[in-house]
Image (tube, rainbow, N blue to C red):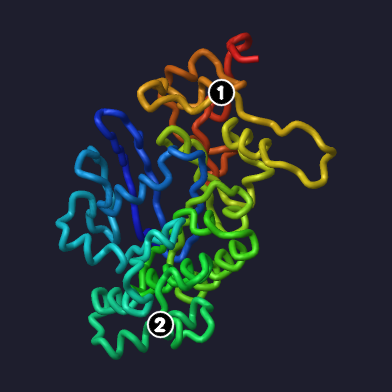
Amino acid sequence: MEALLQIAGLRVAFGGMPTLRGIDLTLRRGESLGMVGESGCGKSVTWLAALGLLTQRAKITGSVRLDGEELLHAPASRLDKVRGGQIAMIFQDPASALNPVRTVGDQISEALRLHRSMDGRTALAEARRLLDQVGIPDAARHLGAYPHELSGGQNQRVMIAMALAGQPDILIADEPTTALDVTIQAQILELLRQIQRETGMALVLISHDLGVVSEICERVMVLYGGRIIEELPAYRLFEHSAHPYTRGLIAALPSLDAPQQRLFAIPGVVPNAADFPPGCPFAPRCDRRIGRCSDWAIELASVDGDIRHRAACLHVTSEPPAGEVVAA
């Protein structure tokens, strides 16, 4: 598939504290990419930085190229057309993302006028079609509704309709089901998958839920401490993950079939941004760490010769000398 967006060496720091430490990724047309990791690992910041949505105090370096065009530090007039146009983003709390004093029809119509130059009547008709597309019943009536008159699931469908208004090449879904109950979560995720199939857009799903990304996405990236520490095809996630952090996340998942027992927890806590070692960011918590882990800058390397599966771990790139393991 053709490369649509390329991020290279993306670094972000706030007040001198590094948040992203060199993100490199390529997103191809029509593919679905999952990004997982603990809160604060850099999943959302990656895309907020790429779209120029961080505050001025953020120091951003690197490159973000959309169809070959550099977006990082592009003029605001250009980014206004990209955001909501070529790249759309939906957030985890639709109630706070929508304007409470404007009807949903007005808000969708505004996006249509901005990104597709539609007049008022045409935009309203297209807004109705979009509400139909995202599964809101009696779309004509709901055009005049305010966000507080809709359920959480309906508001998230409205957000998806607004995202689709600009006919984006890329849809970034940032924890789109966090605020919803389990039944509605499944409906929203299936809707995203269906829309991706119908439109051919690329989908980036940011989530804490390994099961969701393995079901929805073709490829998964695992982030920790502002770095990508593993990327692999989604079907390999549960059985063939290589990085100790990814394995720890999977081990912490409860099993419905296993006898009742204490859940596994990764030891320690995520360090402060200023306290990460120069080498592997997970080294202070890793039960397989060796002396070099904290000091060596470890790059992603292929796992078992598969270029689609890469991990940033010395146990993948080389065998440690006997006796060098320092963790129990």
Please give the name of the residue rendered at 32% of the width and 70% of the height, measured from the top-left corner: 101
Q: Toward which corner of the image does residue 112 lie, by quadrant?
A: bottom left
Dot 1: what SS?
loop
- The correct choice, above or below, for 1 with respect to 310 in the image is below
Please give the name of the residue rendered at 23% of the width and 58% of the height, measured from the top-left corner: 69
Residue 119, position as x, y percentages in the image? 24, 87
Q: Say which of 138 and 325 sits in front.
A: 138
- Nearer mark to the viewer, of 1 and 2: 2
Mark 1 residue crowding within 10 angstroms, few (<14) / some (14–19) / many (20+): few
Q: Toward which corner of the image does residue 187 lie, by quadrant?
A: bottom right
Q: Say which of 47 and 14 sits in front.
A: 14
Specify whether residue 200 is in view: no
Q: How many marks?
A: 2
Image quarter in which the N terminus is found: bottom left
First-in-chain label (1 vs 2): 2
Q: Amino acid at mark 2?
A: Leu
Q: CA distance from mark 1 to mark 2?
A: 49 Å
Query: Which residue was labeled with disc 2?
Result: 143
Residue 284, position as x, y percentages in the image? 51, 20
Left-right relation of 169 to 65 = right
Query: Which residue was labeled with disc 1?
Result: 268
Please give the name of the residue rendered at 56% of the width and 64% of the height, measured from the top-left corner: 189
| Residue at the top extreme, as displayed | 323
Residue 85, position as x, y percentages in the image? 30, 69
